[in-house]
Image: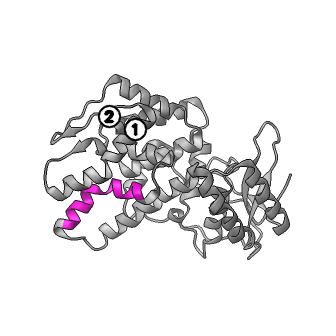
Amino acid sequence: MMRSAMAVRCAPLCAMRVVCAVPMRAVHASAAKFDAPSSVEDMAARLSESKRAEKTMERFWKDVFLGYEAPTNGDDEHFVVQLDRRNLRTPQGAKLAIPADRPLLACLIAQEWDEQTKVVKPHSLPLTSLMSRAIDALQDEQGHKDVQDYLMRYFDTDAVCFHDSEPARLVRLQEERWTPLLDWMRRSFDIEVNVAKDSLVCQQSPETREKVARIVAGLQPLDLASLERAVMTSKSMIIGLALIHRHIEAEQAALAAEVETASQVAAWGAIDDTHDVDHAELRRQLASVACAQVTTEPELVERFLEVLRRRGGAFRS
């Protein structure tokens, strides 16, 4: 229900912002490819770098178009983003095909590319990177299994499972931001998550691990890519699951992920150019996950496509 409500509010607005905005500029060039993580370890390394060097690529296109393609050659219907009428592609050369039930995601990816100025900044393409990750790495069974196994290791040391008895401000934050998530896991999935108190060890039961593993194994590639980013950003499987199931919004996920930091800042103050940067980056990553999870009902997609046709947003069928 929450997904539908958000889709109703956001999809038409996004359509007006992107479809009405094209064409805006134009230049002759081939379809773009960009540098995205190729493995779980690669993605982990990138997220841990607070000041990674930007790869330089100048903007070579003038116009950004949003298109739609009907099923062909066994492919499902999908949206595409085009730079000067050429389809955007992933690092491995696949077409960046965006599921037809996620027009908001398609609009936001188009907007990411339209907002690039003279030099393309990879860090400002979080949704493009997320969609590309799903296409290039998570379509086959082995890629899916590798990510599932990797994420289950995070569950063994899930931040939400380690509580303290002092200081009082930390205890209060853990109770306010973490306990409701544990209650949600119990209610929604019948999963009892063990919690350690003043300990560095928290052992989950085989039954709990099996239930969580089944949830992760059942995710579609884009949803798994979203969970991967949420877990690796928040250091919590529980926060990640709550976010991709739309139990919480990105800001709530961020607040849950920075409980210990918030307690330290309250006691000692914030460090300039560290806490503020981490604060913004955490929200950027989690917001990209939340946006990718918004789906739209078929009848609203059809209405959106009618707008796309009228606006000349590179519609093809």
Q: Amino acid at mark 2?
A: Val
Q: Nearer the viewer, residue 250 or 286?
A: 250
Q: Position of residue 141 (x, y in %)?
A: 57, 29
Q: Look at the numbered disc 2 and give the secondary structure of its residue.
A: loop
Marking on residue 185:
1
Name the residue located 61 percent from the left edge and 65 percent from the top edge.
112
Locate residue 10: give its quadrant: bottom right
Specify whether 68 is left or right of 123: right
Q: Is residue 272 left or right of residue 63?
A: left
Position of residue 170 relative to residue 60, above or below, is above
Along the line of sight, the residue nearer the viewer: 45 or 272: 272
The residue tagged 2 is 193
Main SS type for the magenta part?
helix
The answer to whether residue 42 is seen in the rendering is no
* Magenta span contains residue 253: yes
Q: Which residues are magenta?
A: 252-266
Depth check, front residue: 117 or 176: 176
Left or right: where 196 falls relative to 183 = left
